[in-house]
Amino acid sequence: MLTNEQLEQKVKSIVPNAVLSVADTYGLLDIEVEPKYLPTIAKGLKDQPELKFEMLIDIVGADYSEYPKETKERFGVIYNFKSISLGHRIMLRVWLEEENPKVGSIHDLYKNANFLEREVYDQYGVRFENHPNLKRLLNHVEFVGHPLRKDYPITRQQWLTESDDLMDEMEVRLVEKGYSK
């Protein structure tokens, strides 16, 4: 298993100058990267034999607008990766501007990124460029706004007037798994 210092050097070698800062958060390497390089770095994490981050554990969005400490931008997206075969973990973090928060999708590298990115989009409004189906996942199709943003009114109620059954997605997934209509 690589040390955090070795992991840091390997990540920095994927795209020189893409790493903006590095922190050790309770023993877990937390690397801030330039948003435009996130997909390239994620590919390097997965493909390089000495890294082999074959598992994307989670993608988490955060609205730092009311965070007591100063942050670079309003929105952050945190990616948590694990190498099952080599036993190490790492977090990648990107800061996104308030007006148009967006970052490249990694759905083509990790299948679970498809739904994880949709969740962050639905809750925070972060757009994942080149995502094949970036639409709401947890909130209904008529929902207006993004409920985990700090400026979303907590008492706001939104009613669904038309059912959204998601059967279009279910049928595709069932066919992929060998089931027929």
Image: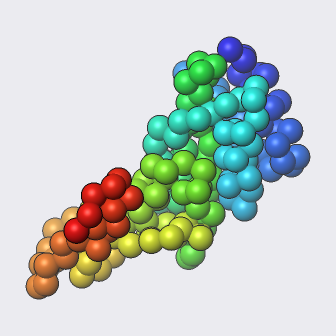
Residue 100 pos. (x, y %): 57, 75
State which quarter of the image contains the C terminus.
bottom left
In this rendered view, identify the residue nearer to me: 176 or 54. Answer: 176
Q: Nearer the viewer, residue 1 or 174?
A: 174
Q: Say if residue 170 shows up in the picture.
A: no
Of 64 and 101, nearer the camera is 101
Task: Name the spot of residue 68 as percent of width and height, x first.
Answer: 48, 47
Q: How is the image coloured?
A: rainbow
Image quarter of residue 158: bottom left
* The one of 64 and 136 positioned closer to us in this rendering: 136
State the image coordinates of residue 66 (x, y, percent, origin top left): 43, 56
Q: Quadrant of the N terminus?
A: top right
Q: As drawn, is 58 to the left or to the right of 86?
A: left
144 shown above or below 89: below
**Image position of 179 (left or right of 89):** left
Give the quadrant of residue 21. Answer: top right
Residue at coordinates 18% horizontally, 72% vertically from top-left? Answer: 165
In percent of width and height, residue 145 lies at: 33, 76
Asked if 29 appears above or below 108 in the picture, the reply is above
At a point 62% along the width and 33% down the height, the residue shown is: 53
How many numbered marks are there?
0
Q: Residue at x 80, y 32 (%)?
A: 10
Is residue 115 shown above or below 57? below
Does residue 107 appear to the left or right of 58 in the view shown? Answer: right
